[in-house]
């Protein structure tokens, strides 16, 4: 692993015991003997002794160890992607043809990462859909992208002057993000990891961001991830995390359609805004709420031309309501998708 990849060992720590990691052959190992493989420059720092949040981590870890042993069947690690078996076969076919302008992993992952509004462009992307990151200019600060997948938010952060470090349990997705950064000429450091057990030392990033990830965690797991994000973010650093609100019209319709049952596996968990504010204050010492979008999750005005014509009108209305919510504050509590923002308070940890 080079100095440019996660600054050597300056950031990384064992996800089991927090000890420093040292090079051991083509992998990393801590003093207590926990060892981890490195695949194509990407450390795979997953724990094999905990229950998964999504059924990708075990595959990533198993195939990474196979790679370390010299069993190297698929350099794209397609089996670790969160897409259907049919789509995986299509990815393989496109790679074999060599005819795609856009990385096939990204083109087929876009529906899983960006949402149902992108279903018409799955496998047919003609450009990389980079969203608007609602944070100040980075000015070289390091930002942690929790659940980076193929890197859309990491690239948006890099384009805004940040030095992104992305984590995700999918090895294939993180490798796609690394390829995308190379193509775009942007900085990116990728680690295969679990948000509940971040493999970093304390206070090593200046900001943290997560979108459409922690809303899928059980509430105890999400709270654990909040605590981990607080641990690795420097005092005064900004944390901005998108979550799904139960108050939004579209969210409530989904809850009714599920007949108010408890969510299963990686289904979206809906929180009340007040529940989220309390959870953030517990983890970070403070919290502010702002609107991401109305009428669903993941609506991005920057991608409006990728949506069907009826949905474009909905996105425009969502944007109008979002801007209005900065003046009419009660409107913010009616959004389907909200951002919680906090500044890491050193007093909170004293």
Image (spheres, helix red, strand yellow):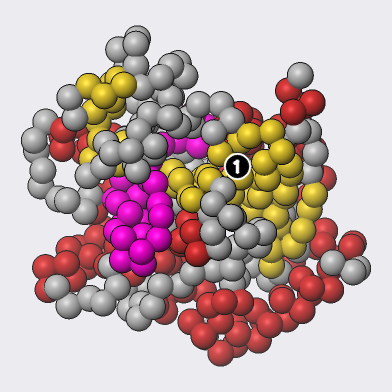
Compared across the picture, whether 284 is left or right of 47 comes to right
Image location (x, y in percent) of residue 281: 78, 36
Q: Is residue 120 above or below residue 115?
A: below
- Numbered marks: total: 1
At x 10%, y 43%, the residue is: 72
At x 40%, y 52%, the residue is: 188
At x 46%, y 45%, the residue is: 165
- The magenta span reads 168-197
Image location (x, y in percent) of residue 292: 69, 63
> Quick check: is 83 in the magenta stretch?
no
Q: Is residue 279 visible?
A: no
Image location (x, y in percent) of residue 268: 58, 51
Judging by the rendered image, the residue that carries numbered circle 1 is 206
Q: State the image quarter where residue 332 is shown.
A: bottom right
At x 69%, y 67%, the residue is: 293
Name the one closer to the observer, 90 or 348.
Answer: 348
Toward the bottom, the furthest residue is: 309
Image location (x, y in percent) of residue 96: 11, 68
């Amino acid at each position: 692993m080079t100095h440019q990849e996660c600054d050597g060992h300056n950031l990384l720590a064992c996800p089991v015991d927090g000890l420093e990691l040292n090079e051991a052959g083509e992998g990393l190992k801590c003093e207590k003997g926990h060892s981890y493989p490195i695949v194509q420059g990407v450390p795979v720092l997953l724990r094999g002794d905990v229950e998964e949040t999504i059924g990708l981590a075990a595959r990533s870890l198993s195939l990474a160890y196979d790679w370390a042993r010299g069993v190297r069947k698929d350099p794209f690690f397609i089996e670790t992607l969160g897409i259907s078996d049919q789509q995986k076969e299509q990815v393989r076919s496109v790679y074999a043809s060599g005819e795609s302008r856009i990385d096939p992993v990204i083109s087929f992952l876009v529906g899983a990462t960006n949402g149902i509004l992108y279903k018409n462009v799955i496998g047919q992307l003609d450009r990389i859909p980079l969203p608007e990151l609602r944070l100040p200019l980075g000015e070289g600060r390091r930002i942690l992208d929790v659940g980076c997948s193929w890197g859309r938010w990491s690239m948006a952060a890099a384009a805004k002057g940040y030095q992104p470090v992305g984590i995700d349990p999918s090895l294939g997705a993180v490798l796609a993000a690394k390829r995308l950064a190379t193509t775009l000429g942007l900085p990116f450091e990728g680690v295969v990891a679990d948000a509940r057990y971040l493999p970093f030392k304390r206070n090593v990033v200046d900001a943290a961001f997560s979108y459409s990830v922690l809303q899928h965690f059980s509430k105890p797991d999400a709270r654990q991830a909040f605590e981990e994000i607080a641990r690795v973010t420097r005092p005064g650093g900004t944390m901005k995390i998108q979550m799904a609100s139960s108050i939004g019209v579209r969210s409530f319709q989904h809850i009714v359609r599920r007949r108010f049952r408890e969510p299963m596996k990686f289904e979206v968990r809906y929180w009340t805004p007040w529940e989220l504010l309390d959870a953030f204050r517990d983890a970070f010492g403070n919290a502010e709420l702002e609107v991401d979008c109305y009428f669903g999750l993941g609506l991005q005005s920057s991608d409006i031309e990728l949506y069907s014509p009826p949905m474009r009108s909905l996105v425009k209305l969502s944007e109008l309501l979002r801007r209005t919510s900065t003046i009419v504050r009660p409107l913010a509590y009616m959004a389907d998708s909200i951002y919680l923002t906090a500044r890491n308070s050193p007093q909170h940890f004293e």
